[in-house]
Amino acid sequence: MHSRRPKVLHELCGRPMVLWPVYAALEAGAETVVVVDSPARALEAILPEGVKLAVQQTPNGTGGAVMAAVASDAGLADPAAPVVVLSGDVPLVSAEAIRGLIEAHANGAAVATMVTTILEDPTGYGRVVRDAAGAVERVVETKLPGDCTPEELAIDEVNTGIFMFDGVPLRRALPRLSAENAQGELYLPEVLDLLRAEGETIVAHAVTDERIVLGINDRVALAQVAKLAQTAIHERHMRAGVSIVDPSATVIDVDVQIGADTVIEPFTTIRGATSIGEECIVRHSYLIDCVLEDGASVGPFGYLRPGTILRVGAKTGTFVEVKNSDIGRGAKVPHLSYIGDADVGEQTNLGAGTITANYDGREKHRTKIGSRVKGGVDTSFVAPVEVGDDAWTAAGSVVTKDVPPGALAVARSRQQNIDGFSERAKTSQRESPLHSEDT
């Protein structure tokens, strides 16, 4: 990845790569999920509650990683528990695929089941070698010269890196793994060889969904996988009743929630844990970690930042930025405004160019605007300030004091017209020594 950040912490549609298989396992019903990390424990801070961490002290391959998981006091404490193995850099495995593996393992009466698939271009993947009867004989690696024979390299059935083992046979085989291979690592697929040599049943569970083998080793692959993940996210929302007018021009993170009959227009980006209700409209805008209740409307060219709440039927219009503010039921901020750290009451209408000046150079303060307030265009509210219900502000006002309910706040200099000013200005320019063609 050419990055200071660990590979599996790179984000995929708003979620660290490693958490995609973690959430798939949880959705599939895993009682215990263990994530294997390096001694730096870089993943510990992002793991969901209840997910455990095991440390692989030496980067000695997939077999070593599983050994760390089953040996960890915090990990797989029950030696008889069946174990599903997933890869943190193969994020598109689904809960459905995991449940299919569990079912195949049970139906096959196997001690080990390996998920396989057929690839047109299997370059870089371990090949599945079968015997004359079609049973799995072994998996051979192909990453370096000497890993396999030319005949094995021609096989197009590949190991996806997804396995299920009975707990006791797995623990029995792991200590016997050998690092005598081109990479000097402990290969987890060798467990299959060891168990088969003991006469145990090994089953291959073939799947047709090639996405579950799409590993990420560089930023090109990250972008390719992200495109597939984004398509799946769009399809999930559209099948649930959301209209995404142009999916190719829309970005939606995986944890975003959107209600039925909401319309997402092109060139919209919705990030983080944003929640959008039913029958909302989002036009050409950027939303992150915010909440839109039913019937809310945003944009075009809106920017809703973290902590923003648009209550039922509220509207923010063209070129409006809102941050950490609660916009009340039916309230409107139509255009060209910045509302930050504010509470706006229901049915309030803030005119164009409204600004809440929420920072005094040391601290941020909150603006409280009541219900049914009529804000004149180009009004600035200098926080902390409170405007009562049914109050008005005159256009161009800079409001620095509280406004009582029902009052009109006029906070601007009285207009003065100076007659003849244009002619006086011209005379002044002609007489000025600076007014010449050489200046």
Image: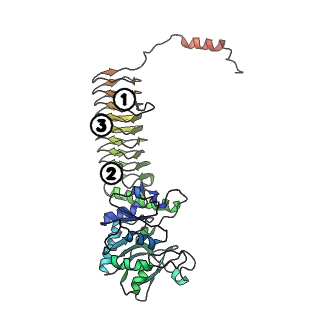
The amino acid on which the numbered mark 2 sits, given as a three-letter code, is Ile
The amino acid on which the numbered mark 3 sits, given as a three-letter code, is Gly
Query: First in sequence: mark 1 or mark 3?
Result: 3
Residue shown at 45%/31% (left/top)?
361
Disc 1 to disc 2, how far (Cα)?
Answer: 34 Å
Residue shown at 44%/75% (left/top)?
188
Q: Nearer the viewer, residue 342 or 70?
A: 70
Q: Nearer the viewer, residue 383 or 182?
A: 182
Q: Name the residue under label 3.
A: 328
Quadrant for the C terminus, please. Answer: top right
Task: Check contact, mark 1 vs mark 2: CB within 8 A.
Answer: no
Residue 384 shows which numbered tag? 1
Q: Mark 2 points at which residue?
A: 258
Task: Check contact, mark 2 vs mark 3: CB within 8 A.
Answer: no
Q: Is residue 224 visible?
A: yes
Mark 1 lies on a secondary structure that is loop
Front disc: 1 or 3: 1
Tell me which corner region of the image, top left, top right, bottom left or bottom right, holds residue 194.
bottom left
Q: Where is 222 relative to 123, above or below?
A: above
